[in-house]
Image: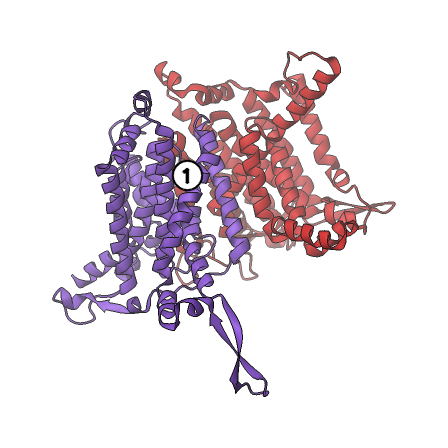
Amino acid sequence: MDAIILQILNGLDKGSAYALIALGLTLIFGTLGVVNFAHGALFVIGAFCAVTLNRIFSISFETIDPTKTDFLGNPATIKTTYLEHWFGPDPAAWMTDWSVPLAILLAVPVMLLVGVIMERGLIKHFYKRPHADQILVTFGLAIVLQEVIKFFYGANPIQMAPPEVFIGTMDLGVWLGFEANAIAYPYWRLVYFLFSAVVIGAVFAFLQFTTFGMVVRAGMADRETVGLLGIDIDKRFTITFAIAATVAGIAGVMYTPITPPTYDIGVELLVLSFVVVVVGGMGSLPGAVLAGFLLGIVESFASMNEVKNILPGIDQIIVYLMAIVVILVRPRGLMGRKGVMED
Amino acid sequence: MLGLEKKDFTLLLIVAAMVVFAPFILNPFPEGSSLAQMFNAGYPDLMQRFAIFGILVIGFNILFGLTGYLSFGHAAFLGAGSYAAVWMFKLVGYDIIPAILLAILVSGLFSLLVGYVSLRRSGIYFSILTLALAQMMFNMAYSVLGNPSSGYNLTNGETGLQVYNSDPQIFLSATGQNFPNLLGFSMRSETHLLIGNWDFTLNAGYYLSGLLLLISFYISIRIFRSPFGLMLRAVKSNQQRLHYTGLNTRPYTLAAFVISGMYAGLAGGLLACMDPLAGAERMHWTASGEIVIMSILGGVGTLIGPILGAGFNEYFKNILSKINDSVLHEWMAFLPDGFENVMVTLIHPFVGKGWHLTLGLLFMAVIIFLPGGLVEGGQRIGKLFRRTKADKPSDETPAGKETE
């Protein structure tokens, strides 16, 4: 029993990342009708917002300390970060420690801007072009974005630490009535899961309870009619795109302590997120979230040693196998609407 | 001639001439000059890649160009072909005929499986499905079937599959060769032709790839002009109408998918013949993306486009990756000092290790401004010339049949 709970928990953090990316993909596909191959790159941009903020925080200047000398007898220089200079040592230490969550504050405006520029500058011109062209141009954009990041940050993974409070593991088993150390779960993964739940909830609430969201939902159902009612649907869709980009971006920010970001993590996640979208049902937001968590958990179960001993390597391909089964048995996906993308 | 119309036959002849004289055309600068180091492309390695990727993209074009189905997983078939060929080297010996035949067969089987599943859907779904299935094949090759400690190490994982001395190679003694060969004629053997300062290399492997490129090109022309090809075009222009007339299009699209998969297998087998090892990175989905890029750069749905696209991509990849900072400084030497450094810093991200960026930007530019690729570009320029010369719009498309 405890092993099962542990695997479910292990699947949750990866599932959260899948769900967040797939949610954005579905939002874009549902509103704009475009499959965004650059969505993985948006996740990476978010991740590197965290890296950037961390670097900004560590920018420092040197002063000469007259009281100390180094081993050659020269006056020693001490490095002081600007952060410390401006805010004092304690807040500076706190801010550096919390740089990953704080990076969300940087990532949100950056991602909104990137989203608006992408949609207005590029994707807008492809609404009337064939689907293949949309896929290809976003694919090209993904390559370009990825290479730009590689140019600035290099190709090596960059380690990022979560705030010190969340380092280490928490003994969940004791809470649930198991013996100690039966279910040990890293704090940060729990934070990531709760964070993604909040983001997903916020997106759904936004779509469900605001006028703006209502218009967007109406536009997803019938774009033309909404336009005929005198609503500037294009502007709404631009903002929707920016929101989807932001969701991917902050998913990337918070993911950095789990996997050290490299310029090409988006590539792998993107393929899996597409699988998630297909399994969940193209154009269905709850489907994307459900399938995201489902696939994350299934993947985690498949990587158990007990399973691997019977079917070696199954954890590498289980997600794809599930997608094939879903396509063959239920082409519209788990929660897809009847008639949507069934051809 | 050969069952082709006059125009197509001329095109075939032009391509044949290009293949035969490539070692000369691609070596325009004398040996040892700095221009030669940078721009000469007439060495066997690169020319083999031109021909092999030409074959690959010709095959891809039969699927994407004719039916409009955008496969994002073709590299998987290339990789499967390579693995099959290397296995043949390991088991039978360095004869390339069985290796290439098995490569085509294996890729054909894989494409049949992948095609059967993914062709149930069309449009975006098809692209995503091929992408996922190919990525699954990549994962299988990279880790699942490549674990040296397990009993079924088919691909040798990260290291890549290669031929070892301990391999059976039951027919090796017959020819006594230790490199892939065609009836005892090694793929590595080459003749150097020294004319003046020029050194032209005529390489057996290249000419074999070139010959196969010509055959593939011929077959692709025949497919383009056949009733089967016409049916595929009908699928592209309006599949729904075909369904309404009571026609089942899936056998046709599946046939096209398998044919293009077999082309990829041939290319993969040839890659292994030129260099007998196979790695999983050949199957990664970004490699599939590169195939798409090549076909777009050349011109989708045209006959000559794939060859141009493959050549263009490989050539510029080669040149761009060779330009480093010292070369840039040399080129910009005529500028005033400060300005020179600024220019070098500006160009630096786009060359050398950053060639991906340049190709990505170029690819985007082509999609945005020139969806027909190089062929359309050539036609536009041709039209421009004709207009200015005759001062009246021509009523026939310049490149005739190719535009279809």
- In percent of width and height, residue B70 lies at 46, 33
Coloring scheme used: by chain
Chain colored red: B
Q: Is disc 1 placed on a helix, strand or loop?
A: loop
The front one of B327 and A250 is: A250
- In percent of width and height, residue B269 lies at 56, 44
Chain colored purple: A
Residue topped by disc 1: A36
Q: Would you say B313 lies left or right of A148 here?
A: right
Q: Would you say A201 lies left or right of A141 here?
A: left
Location of the C terminus of chain A (image quadrant): top left
Q: Residue at x 37, y 21 (%)?
A: B248
Q: Residue at x 38, y 44 (%)?
A: A245
Q: Would you say B392 lies left or right of B242 here?
A: right
Q: Is residue B371 above or below residue B53?
A: above
The front one of A83 and B122 is: A83
